[in-house]
Amino acid sequence: MKGEIRDDIIVGLDIGTTKTCAVIGSINENNQIEVTGVGTAPSKGLKNGVIVNIDNTASSIAKAIDEAELMAGHEVSSVFVGISGQGIKGENSRGVVAISNRSRTITSVEIKRVIEAAQAIVIPVDREILHVLSKEFSVDDQTGIKDPTGMSGVRLEAEVHIITAQVTTIQNLIKAVDKSGFQCQDIVFNPLASADAVLSRDERDLGVALADIGGGTVELMVYLEGGVSYSKVLSVGGIHVTNDISIGLRTPIESAELIKKKFGCAVLDLVDASETIEVPSVGGRAPRKLFKQELTQIIEPRMTEIMEMIDQELLKSGKRDMLAAGVVLTGGASMLDGCVESAEKVFSMPVRIGVPRDIAGIKDKVATPQYANAVGLLIYGARMSRFRGKARFERSGAGVFSKIKKWLEDYL
């Protein structure tokens, strides 16, 4: 018996290329996220973070949430869902307005106007705005202002980072969640959620890059002076390492994934030359024994390539030399042994693994990088809880999606 649906419950749903994860929680008396239920299921309807089979995706969602409900002891009705895929794009924009009220004082009205001016960019009809994230404001000649409310001036300027997604990607995601029997409370770009779970305020202020390495994608987000400055999705991830192992060792994909998780290492120098592993064969042949170094020689080049792709994006962003706090790696594929050492070789800057922090409840269940996004969605949902009951995305009979815009969610 799961129990009745409670209004104070928040659900984070991470639909990944290889696994679907649901985390249930609420805000406790200490104003912390308290995790009460966790559920996972293999993902069978996605490719590189994008849904390619709605029925299979809906089945994975239902299984993951059902498992989390059983653990938590109550049912849920709506979820905060992460979104990814090559169709997600980020760009910076700037808006300017005159402060026209008599007192020349900046209020929420002026802030809303300048944000709207900044997001007045040409967006193709097949795309939709997911987030408008404020970087900083300027009042007359004063720059670097985080919240200009109450200041006086004649000219208000805003720099924002706009994240858009393909309309079809959003539609398919909502259809899959809807078919599984739940409602989308909101849709959130994955690394934005992960950042809430694993980054500190100091890191965001100093300058940090978050690389969420999942099964089929790497989602990159760069923070400078507390705000998002750059974002990118790369179509590469842990599944590519698994495929390399499967081909290189001539073993089934399922066995390759298990071998990667149990014995995998990203740096050859960290492996004992005498250590051996047992590798299942195909076609009913007997298992073989190989030196672990042979496995690492397959993994190391691919992991180096992934890190180099991330590094190229950091160079492209123009912010690479400003990352005083270095790089934080999270996501399931970052759990591979030697991942930090591999990254440090390429980036030549501090690297750490990001795990969910400042949470209560069954935190041991989610204190690993693979749960960063789902826990981050819980934190995001808690912040948006004042809008509970109002789904941000709703499906009309004509298939058109209307967004309830809550500009204060993302701007301040």
Image (spheres, helix red, strand yellow):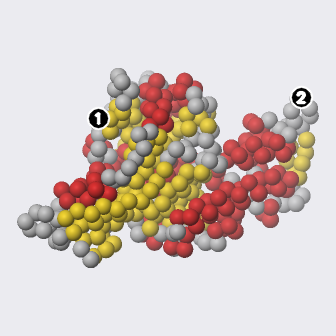
Secondary structure, mark 2, is loop
What is the count of numbered marks?
2
Q: Which of the 4 image quadrants contains residue 143?
A: bottom left
On the rendered structure, is 124 left or right of 325? left
- Between 25 and 318, the residue placed more toward the observer is 318
Residue at 78% x, 63% y is 270
Disc 1: CA contacts within 10 A as few (<14), some (14-19) or many (>=20): few
Find residue 284 and name its label: 2
Mark 1 to mark 2: distance in Å?
54 Å
Q: Position of residue 210 (x, y in %)?
A: 53, 59
Q: Quadrant of the N terminus?
A: top left
Quadrant hosting residue 40: top right
| Image spot of residue 165 (x, y percent) | 46, 44
Camera sees residue 34: no
Please tell me in which quadrant of the rendered image residue 109 appears: bottom left
In the foreground, 325 or 289: 325
The one of 368 and 385 positioned closer to us in this rendering: 385
- At which x and y percent is residue 6? 33, 32
Is residue 1 visible from the viewing direction of this image?
Answer: yes
Q: Is residue 286 above or below residue 335?
A: above
* Of pointers 1 and 2, the one earlier in the residue sequence: 2
Name the residue at 54% across, 24% down: 55
Residue for badge 1 = 389
The one of 166 and 243 positioned closer to us in this rendering: 166
Q: Identity of the amino acid at label 2?
A: Gly
Residue most extreme to the bottom: 141
Residue 183: percent from the left, percent from the top? Answer: 39, 30
Q: Residue at x 32, y 46 (%)?
A: 384
Amino acid type at image mark 1: Gly
Mark 2 burial class by Cα count in 10 Å: few <14, some 14-19, many 20+: few
